[in-house]
């Protein structure tokens, strides 16, 4: 699945994502551009949740924490969109998307005793940490394949 941001006027703001100030007053929407769903199957529930969360962090400006936090960078947003588009299944739970003080984003899943955090830096690099009981791992450079595997484990656990 591929997802991109489009503004209300239909202009692409994903691959050539511009700085947040160029989108002031324009709501951007996550849309599916490579649709694996048939008309009889709806888009996944997580898509709307992710759209709402990315729009909320997209509106933040420098100093959003009342101090020195930087606005979320276009590179961080782009990486989140790409990672989720490459790894999320129809039944995957949406992550909590949290801005970080350095202009990055953190994706958090807490489900059935599993904690999975993905940190996307302001330069778009992704790392991850996961704990499930006594199993714990950390990757300084996260691959989409590793994230997809962990997300599928979460889906299997929640169905059990």
Image (cartoon, rainbow, N blue to C red):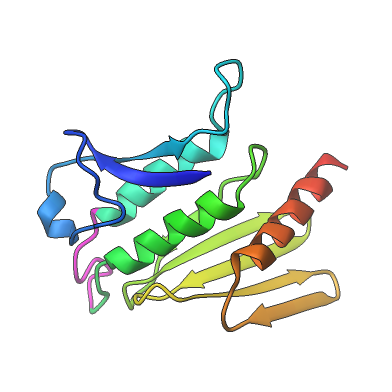
The residue at 67%/38% (across/down) is 91
Q: Nearer the viewer, residue 142 or 20?
A: 142
Query: Which quadrant holds residue 93?
Result: top right
From this view, report whether residue 36 is shown above or below residue 77: above
Query: Which quadrant holds residue 109?
Result: bottom right
Q: Nearer the viewer, residue 102 or 141?
A: 141
Query: Which quadrant holds residue 113?
Result: bottom right
Q: Is residue 72 visible?
A: no
The residue at 23%/77% (across/down) is 67
The residue at 64%/43% (across/down) is 89
Task: Please report the bounds of the magenta region as a residue range.
Answer: 59-67
Left or right of 18? Residue 149 is right
From this view, report whether residue 29 is shown above or below residue 60: above
> Which residue is at the far top?
40
Q: Is residue 5 visible?
A: yes
Q: Position of residue 58 (x, y in %)?
A: 28, 55
> Which residue is at the far front?
34
Left or right of 141? Residue 57 is left
The residue at 37%/60% (across/down) is 78
Q: Residue 64 lies in magenta, yes or no?
A: yes
Q: Nearer the viewer, residue 64 or 2?
A: 2
Q: Position of residue 147 (x, y in %)?
A: 65, 63
């Amino acid at each position: 699945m591929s997802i991109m941001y489009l503004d209300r006027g239909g202009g692409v703001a994903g691959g050539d994502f511009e700085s947040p100030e160029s989108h002031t007053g324009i709501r951007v929407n996550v849309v599916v551009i490579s649709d694996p769903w048939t008309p009889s199957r709806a888009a996944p529930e997580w898509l709307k949740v992710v759209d709402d969360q990315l729009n909320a962090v997209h509106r933040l400006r420098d100093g959003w924490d009342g101090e020195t936090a930087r606005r979320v960078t276009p590179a961080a947003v782009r990486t989140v969109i790409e990672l989720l588009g490459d790894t999320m299944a129809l039944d995957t739970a949406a992550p909590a998307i949290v801005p970080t003080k350095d202009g990055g984003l953190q994706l958090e899943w807490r489900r059935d005793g599993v904690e999975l955090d993905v940190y996307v830096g302001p330069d778009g690099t992704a790392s991850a940490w996961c704990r499930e009981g006594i199993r714990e791992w950390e990757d300084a450079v996260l691959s989409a394949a590793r994230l997809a595997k962990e997300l599928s484990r979460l889906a299997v656990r929640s169905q059990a």
